[in-house]
Image: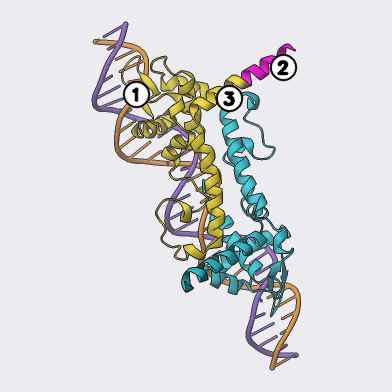
Chain colours: A cyan, B yellow, C purple, D orange
Amino acid sequence: MKFSTKGRYGLKAMFDLAVNYGEGPITLKNIAQRQEISEHYLEQLIATLRRAKLVKSVRGAQGGYMLNHPPEEITVGDIIRSLEGPVGPADCVMDADAEECRNQESCVTRLVWARIQESVNDVIDTTTLGDMLEDQERMNNKKNYMFYI
Amino acid sequence: MKFSTKGRYGLKAMFDLAVNYGEGPITLKNIAQRQEISEHYLEQLIATLRRAKLVKSVRGAQGGYMLNHPPEEITVGDIIRSLEGPVGPADCVMDADAEECRNQESCVTRLVWARIQESVNDVIDTTTLGDMLEDQERMNNKKNYMFYI
DNA sequence: AATATTTCCGACTAAACTACTTGGAATTCA
DNA sequence: TGAATTCCAAGTAGTTTAGTCGGAAATATT
């Protein structure tokens, strides 16, 4: 029940781009160094994010990547789903591959999976990169406060 | 972000035992047939559940398995954790292996993982096998209602 | 024009994990 | 004794994970 590195690295990378939003293209090299991720591996992940239109790229020297939308308009769910596929605890509650579970209407365990899925979706679909930037602000304020008092 | 068959089959098997709670030992063979699970594979899972004291066994002919506690006292979380280990989207929010994430205090993505974990835990720790039995009651009533009207 | 920087693309791979299978020993009821 | 069962340990094909490797294409700078 863990996300793979795809989703986890992907969110870190996207948050890195959010922190640097508006500063022109950021190189993969820099992101990879700051977030301590293999550059070549991250390349694959960001290719997926590009195809999902969450980031855009500038090729050539001085090129790099940037968010394709403002941080407030990109949710954690957008990022994770594009990298990990549909999110949920069991196939029978993910999108439309209802096959193999023919007794959906009477399956009680399915109800449990549905509740889990709903609660996860609620978190990831209501949290944006913008929210995360605010979280970081708050964290820093807290730290400074504790530091100086 | 899916559970493996361990957790999914495990919950089905435990719910089967809940349905038959109080009727003496239920054989693995019967559970496996009803739930359409490989008997030998289920054997491994139920061994884990037995070691976790969630079921007890009776050996020999006419033997089988039964819940070790009333359905209302066994949560979905008990079952899934015993089979899948700690539940959560990333290592850094699961139990005490905080190593490798040295900047916990300032890691914003960790906050996201923590929220996801909390919401999943909330569902699985507040749902018992007893609740699932009630759900089934309700489902059957609904079905009958729709059937006869 | 040449060069350095950077994204883009496709193939390969070791290690771990998943979802089993196989074979048999031990226990208990009839 | 024999049938039904749980208990136990090992093996295994296939998939997934988390990368690596090598180079082509595009672009800014010199």
Question: What amino acid type should be assigned to the residue bearing mark 2?
Answer: Met
Q: CA distance from mark 3 to mark 2?
A: 16 Å
Circle nearer the N terminus (3, 1): 1
**Place of residue B64 in the rendered image (x, y in percent of width and height, measured from the top left):** 37, 20
**The disc numbered 2 marks a residue on which chain?**
B
Q: CA distance from mark 3 to mark 1?
A: 27 Å
Q: Is residue B36 visible?
A: no
Q: Main secondary structure of the magenta part?
A: helix
Q: Determine which quarter of the picture holds residue D8.
A: top left
Circle nearer the N terminus (3, 2): 3
**The disc numbered 3 marks a residue on which chain?**
B
Question: What amino acid type should be assigned to the residue bearing mark 3?
Answer: Asp
Q: A2 or B67: nearer the eye?
A: B67
Q: Are marks 3 and 2 on the same chain?
A: yes
Question: What amino acid type should be assigned to the residue bearing mark 1?
Answer: Ser
Task: Residue under label 1, please give it.
Answer: B57
Q: B149 or C17: nearer the eye?
A: B149
Residue appearing at x 58%, y 27% in the figure: A108
Task: Residue under label 3, please give it.
Answer: B135
Q: Is residue B141 visible?
A: yes
In magenta, the rendered stretch is: B139-149
Residue appearing at x 46%, y 26% in the figure: B72
